[in-house]
Amino acid sequence: MSEMWLNMGPQHPMTHGLWNLRVHIDGEVIRDVDPEMGYLHRGIEKLSEDRHYNEVVTLMDRTCYVAGLAWEHLYILASEEALHIAPPERAQYLRVLCEEFQRIASHLMWYAAFVQDIGLMTPFLYGMRDRDLILDLFQSYTGARMTYEYMRVGGVRNDVPPGFTDRARQVLDWLEPRFVEYDQLTLGSDIFHKRCDNLGVLRANDCVTQGVTGPMLRSAGLKRDLRKDRPYAVYDQLDFEVALADTADVTGRYLVRLEEMRQSVRILRQVLDWLDRHPGPVMASQLPRWLGAPYAPVGREGYLLKRNYPKGVGFSAVEEPHGEALAYVVNEGGEHPYRVKFRSPVYANIAAARHYLVGYRVADIPPIMGSVDICVGEVDR
Amino acid sequence: MKPEDLARSLPPVLAPVLLGVEAFPGFAARVRFRREGALDVFRAIHDLGFTHLAMIGGIDWVDHREVIYTVWSDEARTYLLLSTDVPADDPRVESAVPVWPSANWHEREAWELVGITFDHHPDLRHLLTPDGYAFHPLLRSFKIHEPEELEVKTRHV
Amino acid sequence: MTATPAAVAPPKNASKVESHRADAELPMAGEPAVPFLEIEALRAREFIPAAKEALTDLIAEQGQSKLIRPVFNWAGRNSLFPLHWGLACCAIEFAAAFGARWDAERFGVVPRSSPRQSDLMIVNGTVTWKVAHKLITLYEQMPEPKWVIAMGNCATGGGPFRTAYSVVPGVDKLVPVDVYIAGCPPRPEAMLDGILLLETLIRERKE
Amino acid sequence: MSNATLYSVSYDLVHAVLFAIGSVLPAPLHGWIESDGLVTGLAVLVFGVILLAASMLNTILLIWWERKLLGRFMDRRGAMHVGYAGLLQNFADGFKLFRKDTVRPREADPLGFVTGPTAYMVTSMIMFGILPISSGWNSGALPLSLLLALAVFSFAPLFIFVSAWSSNNKYSLMGGMRSAAQMIAYEVPLLLAVVAVVIVAGSFDLTTIVYEQQNYWFWGPLFVALVVFVAGMLAEMERIPFDLPEAEAELVEGWNTEYGGMLFAFFMLADYLRALVGSILVVLLFLGGWTMPSWVPSVATSFPLAGIVWFMVKTYAVFGVFIWIRASLPRVRTDQLLRVGWNRMIPLSLLSVFLAAALVTVKCLPVFGCVPSPGI
C-alpha cells in the first residue's frame, strides 16, 4: 500500500457524530490529518439573535446533546450578567446539581463510546445502563431525558419534586461501586494497557499552545479547572479535588474522567444535603416583565416590549464535561440577544488533532479520538 | 490583576496602538487597541503570561465590526478580553496564529461567519459552511427566513 | 414548501434509484462556479402512496410465488438492519435504544456500519445542506429494498432549526421517508415504535 | 449404535427407493437402476446433503447461541421476538439477505468480487466432509484427514484478500491486508500445536486421534498446545480480540464493507462455519471428540446418537468460551498481534512439541495415566 488519503467520515463508526477526519496514511502509519467539520452546523449563534433570552435555552440543550444542562448553565450565567439579574441561592445549587449529574452522564456516555472504540462490547451496555439511571432523575424534575429546557434567566423553571434527594442518593450509592467495576473491565486487562498506554500523547505545553482544555489538559498534569480557578455559581462553597494525571496519554484521560465522576459524586452528596436543609424560592422575584413569568408559555406573543432596559455584556466560563466552555452575550436593549458567541472545548481539542494523531497507526485513531470525547453538536453549533 | 497593573506592565512602545485598558465584567480587563499594531499587542499580552487563547469572535455593529479575543493566564488565573474595531468596508486584521497557534480555527470561523479577513493566516478556508458558501451569516444584514419563503430549493455543494 | 405537480416524481418509478438521483443534473454549462443542485421535493402525503406502490412493485417483482412472498415479507420485516450513523441529538437516543434497557436487538434490529448491508436509514438528527449530498449518496448505496425513518423533529421538518440558513427543513426533501417519528428527541420507545410501525407497513404490502 | 451410521442409513434408504423404482421398470433399466455403483453414488450424495444441511443448521444455531449468550453477558436479552426465544431470527436475516439486491460497485473487479465470497464459503463447507462427527459419521475416512482439514482451512486468507482487493475500497483493502498478514502469522503456531497432538496420537487421522484419547483427553498433558491452538484459532476465526480485519471502529466493516445482499450472507455464514469448524477441531484434538471418560455412567453414553449429542454439547461449550472471550476483551492492534504471533506463539508451540515428544518417551504420567501404544 502506498500513501493515500483516507476519509473517515462523515458516516464512520469512529466519528461518534457527523464530521470527517481526513487521514493521510503511509501503510498503516498516519502522516497527516485534516479534520473537516461543519456537517452539523445549524447556525445556533445566528438563531439566538432571533429568539428571546429564555428561548435560547432550547437551542443550548441541542448544542451539546450529551451535556445539555452544562450548556444551559453556561448560557444562563452569561445572559444573567448581561441582563443584570441575580438568581436565588437555591437555584444556584440546583444548577450545580444539574451540572454535576450531567457531568457523570456525559462521562458515562463517553465511557460507553470509548470502550467500544477499542473493541470492548460489554461495557458499552453497562455505561448506557447506568446513564439511564441519571436520565431518569433528570426526567423526574425536568420532564425530559436529554433536552431539558430547565434553566431560566433568574433561576430555574421548577424545584425538584419531594423525595428527589433520596432517589438521587440511591443512584449515587449504586454508581460508586460501578466505577470500580468499570476499572476492572478496562484497566484490569493487559490488552487495554497495550492499546492505550503512551498513545495520543499531548504534553502540557502543547495543550496550552493548542488551546486544549478539560480532561485532556488535566491528564497532562496541568491543574486547571474553572470550578476551582474561577468559581462560578456556588462551587467555591463545595469541597472537591481536581482530578489529575501526568501521563498525557489515553490512559491518563481515562483515569481523569473516572476520577472526575467520583469527585462529582462527592460534590453531589454535598449539594443534596444542602438542598434538604435550605428550602426556598428558585426564581428571582424582581424579574423584568418582558422576560415572562417562569411558567408562562414560551411564545412570540404575550411579551411586553422592553424599553430603556440597561445594556450590558455578559461573559461566563463553565467547566463543561468536555472542557472549558465560554459564552459571550451582548445585550443591546432588545428582546433578543444582540450577539451570542460560544467557545466550545471540543472545538479546540479537535483542532489540535494533528498534534496527537500524527505518527500513530490507523488502528489508534478510534481510541485516541474516543479519548478526546467528541460532541460534534457543540463544535459545529 | 487589576486593569491599572496590566496597563503598567504593558511595554510603553505599545502606547500609540493602545486605545485603553479598562475594567470589564467577567474579565480582568478589556484591552482595546488599533488593528495596525495587533501583532505587537498579541506578543506583549502573550509575554505577560496569557498563553491560552480561548476564543476569537466577531461582532457586527453594522457601521463597523469588532473582533474580540479572550485569553487566559495560568499564573493570574483570569481571563482578559482584547478587542479591536475594523471598518465594515475593509474588515481585516493581522492573524494571531504566530502568537497563539490555537487561533487557527477560530479565525477561520470568524472569517466565514462574520466576514473578517485575517492577514497572513496559514490556511484561511471554510470550516463550518460548505466550500464556496458566499454569505457571512452572522452579519446583521443576513436575515433569517422561514423555509417557505425560499423560492427555489437550491443549495451549495 | 411549494410543491408543484411537476416536482412530484411519478410514483411508478419511486422505487428506482435513478429517479432520486439528485446529482443526475449536476453541474451544467453556464452555471456559476458553485454548482447548485436541484432536489426533487415531495410532500409527505405524496410520498406515502409512492412508497406503497414502490413496495408493492418490489414484492411483485421479487416474490412471484404466493408461497415465497410471505416468507420474504416476514424475513424483510423481522430483520431490519439500520445504518449505523449519528447525526445529532437523536443519535444518542438511537444508541440508548440499543442499550440494556430497550435492547432493540430483540426485534432483530442490528446496526451495520456499511450502507451496503443495511436496509433501513434512520435519519437521527438535523440534516444540514453540507451533509445532504452525502446522505443521498448513502441512501443510494443501500441496496433495495430499503426504507427511511425520519427520527425526530429535525429530520421531519427542521425542528427548532427550521429557520436556520444551513439546515434542510425535513429530510423528505432529499430522500423518500416511510415513517416519521415525532419528538425532540424521540424517546427510545418512540424509536422502537417507529420501527414496529415500519414492520406493520411492510406486512400490509403483502396484499 | 455402532452398526447404524449415517452412511449406512442413507445407503439403505437409497437402496430401498431404487429397488422399488427398479421393480416396476423393464429389464435393461431394472439392472442398471439396481446396480451397486449407482446406489453407492447416490447414497454418498444423500449423505452429503444431509451433512451439509445439518452443518448449516448448526451454524445458524451457533449464531443464535452467540447472540443470546452475548446478550446475557451484556445485561440484555438478545433476539427474542422472532420465533421462540428468537430462534428464527437468523432465518429471517438469511431470507432477507437472499432477497436483497446484490450491488457490485462500478469499479469493482467483476470476477473477484463474486468469486471471493463464493470460494470462501465453499472451502469452509468442504471442511464438513472431512471432519468426523461421531463414529461412522464422516463421508471420507481419510488417513490424513487432519492435514487435509488444516490445508482447506488455510485457504481463507487468499479468498478474503481476493474479495478485499476486488472491492476497490480502501477499507476493504486494509482489512484484506491485515487479514492475510494475521492468518499467515498464526498458521505456523497452529500447525505446530497440531504437531504436538499428532506426535502423541501417532496418526493424522482424526478418528484415530479421537480414539487415542480414551485414557485421557489431550487438553491436560498438552495444555500448552491447547492454549496455542485456541489463540491461533481465535486469530483464524477473526474474533475479538483478534478481529482486526473487520475492526468496526476504524475499518468500517473491514473487508466486507462493499458487500451486501447474498454475498454478504456468504461471508457471515462462512465466518460462523469457520467458527464451528474451529470449535469442532478443538473438541476433536483436545477434548476427546464424541467419547466420554469412563467414569461417566454408561446410561449417559449409550443412548442412540449419544456420540453426536456429546460432541455437540462440547462444541457449543467451546464456542461459549469463545463468546465469553469476545464479551470481555478489547481488540489488539495489528503490530501487537503479529508480534505476539511471531515472538510468543511460535516458541510456545515449539515448547508444546517438545513436551509432546517427552510425553511419548515417558509414556506414563502420574495423574493422567499412560499413552496408548500406537496402532490400537
Image (cartoon, rainbow, N blue to C red):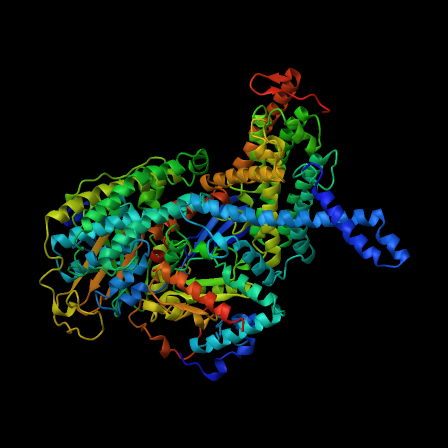
Q: How many marks?
A: 0
Q: Position of residue D174 (x, y in %)?
A: 57, 47
Percent coordinates x, y for residue A303 in the rendering:
17, 73
Left or right of residue A139: residue D161 = right
Any part of residue D137 in sight:
yes
Q: Is residue A215 above or below residue C18?
A: above
User: To which quarter of the image does residue B154 belong?
Assistant: bottom left
Picture coordinates of residue A357, whole percent (x, y): 44, 44
Q: Name the residue: 45% across, 39% down.
A: D328
> Observer-nearest residue: B133 or C181?
C181
A318 or D50: which is nearer to us?
A: D50
Q: Residue at x 47, y 69 (%)?
A: C201
Is residue A40 visible to us here? no
* Residue at far right of view: D28
- Image quadrant occupied by the C terminus of chain A: bottom left
B148 above or below A147? below
Front-most of residues A206 and D289:
D289
- Vertically, is B133 above or below B119? below
Where residue D25 appears, as percent x and y from the top left, is 85, 59
Q: Residue furthest bottom?
A: C5
